[in-house]
Image (cartoon, helix red, strand yellow):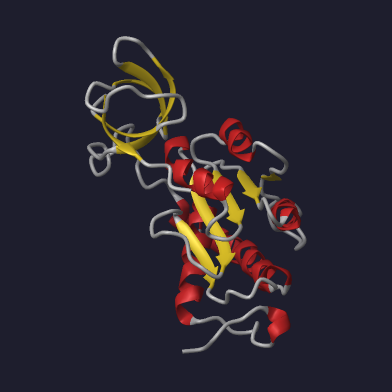
Amino acid sequence: MTTFTAIDRGLGAELASDLATDLAAAAFTLAKRFAAGATMWSIAPSWEPHALHIAVEFVHPVIVGKRALPAVALTGPDLVDLVRVSVRPGDIVIAVSGARDADVCSVMRRGPAWGATTLWIGSGERPQAGMADHVLWLDDPDPRVPATGGFVLFYHLLWELTHVCFEHAGLLKPECAEDVCVTCGDEGRLGEVRAAAADETATVRTARGVENVVTTLVGPVATGDLVLVHAGTAISRIEDTR
């Protein structure tokens, strides 16, 4: 197996096979989302230049004939609220941070309720399994890693591979052609409570939009709580692990 470290550390020309697979899978997902009209929202609370660089990378068509892709960097305080009001179902949220960044953890956890595809780039300690749809990670815990070029290489490759996927338009068609997919229609869906009512119901944001659900099974809920929704009912609570 080949090895990978950041460019300035001498081995940036090669990728470990599992990391290369992760990059290819993430790029394929991005291409499908962009083809369906997605906007990419980039965040990097501790390293805001990365968020700005990602947005520029995807918006600016540096190669003749390549598409300019909609991408916006979100920066500043109240980042979770900022992402919440910006993201629409089908959009992409890409984060660059360590595994313990509280804002990024909350955004990644809530992504499915907002209908967003999530991608997390980082290094050192890994986030919990399942925290994001795609995780591109350097296991090196050296705190200098974010500045050495490895993260930049990740999103440069994502940009290039996404455009490679655009060359195969037949692969980018929507997976579910019907309003209700027989494969996923009966699954529990993550929802974020927008407002609770006195009659044991609540308005909840899910990937399908805003829904009214019964909350009897989970007890009183508050704005911002995460619940699992099935058949118009909140059937369990989900901890917003930070």
Query: Where residue 181 sits: x, y (%)?
Result: 28, 39
Identify the residue shown where x is 49% and y is 74%: 19
* Relative to 66, residue 219 above or below: above
Identify the residue shown where x is 59% and y is 53%: 95
- Which of the 4 quarters of the picture holds residue 153? bottom right
Query: Where residue 49 sits: x, y (%)?
Result: 76, 56
- Towards the viewer: 240 or 48: 240
Query: Where residue 63 sits: x, y (%)?
Result: 75, 63
Identify the residue shown where x is 22% and y is 26%: 217
Query: Where residue 229 sits: x, y (%)?
Result: 29, 32
* Relative to 142, residue 55 above or below: above
- Towards the viewer: 33 or 187: 187
Q: How many marks?
A: 0
Identify the residue shown where x is 63% and y is 75%: 142
Q: Is residue 84 left or right of residue 218?
A: right
Q: Is residue 7 left or right of residue 138?
A: right
- Towards the viewer: 165 or 205: 205
* Relative to 99, residue 77 above or below: above
Q: Can residue 34 be spotted in the picture? A: no
Q: Can residue 1 be spotted in the picture? A: yes
- Towards the viewer: 100 or 184: 100
- Which of the 4 quarters of the picture holds residue 159? bottom right
- Which of the 4 quarters of the picture holds residue 162? bottom right
